[in-house]
Amino acid sequence: MFVGWDLHSLPVTIPVNVALELAKDKKRCLLIDLDIRRDAIARVFNIEDIPELRVKASRTEVENLWVWPAHNFTRLKQMNVKLLVQKALEKFDLVIINSPYLASSPDRNQILSSAQAAIIFSPDDSKTTELTKLIKASQCTLIGKIQSPEVKAKVIST
């Protein structure tokens, strides 16, 4: 699954709450954060940027939930989301990708080709339209769009 949103409209609570709900349902879940500008998911789960020889997912205090913080991507020479997701699906039931800058990312095709389904959150119709076109041009299925001028963080049950 992929969660795309417009940075100015939505905090990181949506992908975090989706991951928490899935983990509560006994699904082994990996939440990948592609927001290297803020690395907010690492802060939510108090995951420090500790230099290690091996870059890996961090276990959270929540049973069944691991996080791949954005700061892991700054240590890699090249971002390969597709390979990361393929490897992760060997261990996890679900992988959620938080990608707030998808429309402007040079890796957008790789990110979309890694995802089976997408949800878009944005109050801006032009951003929603742009993201919808990108998703429809890929093999990824758009399963939802939430567009509201005042998007509030909500827990989403699946």
Image (tube, rainbow, N blue to C red):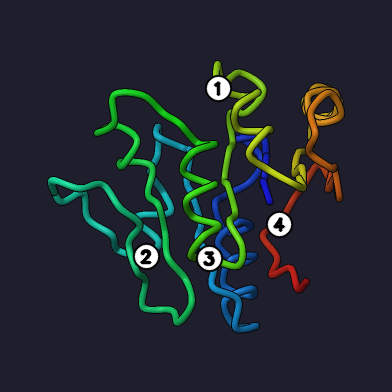
* 154 with respect to 125 (left or right): left
Under mark 1, the amino acid is Asp
Residue 106: x and y in percent read 55, 16
Q: Which mark is residue 107?
A: 1
- The alpha-carbon separation of the residues under discs 3 and 1 comes to 23 Å
Q: Which mark is residue 152?
A: 4
Mark 3 neighbour density, 10 Å: few (under 14) some (14–19) many (20 or more): some
Q: Is residue 111 above or below residue 105?
A: below
Q: Which residue is mark 3?
A: 92
For image coordinates 30% across by 53% down, the residue present is: 56
Q: Is residue 136 above or below residue 87?
A: above
**Residue 106 as seen in the image, left or right of residue 37:** right
Q: Nearer the viewer, residue 91 or 122?
A: 91
Spatial separation of the CA atoms under disc 4 and disc 3: 29 Å
The amino acid on which the numbered mark 4 sits, given as a three-letter code, is Lys
Q: Which residue is mark 2?
A: 45
Crowding at label 2, few (<14), some or many (≥20) Cα neighbours within 10 Å? some
Look at discs 2 and 3 and give the one toward the viewer: 3
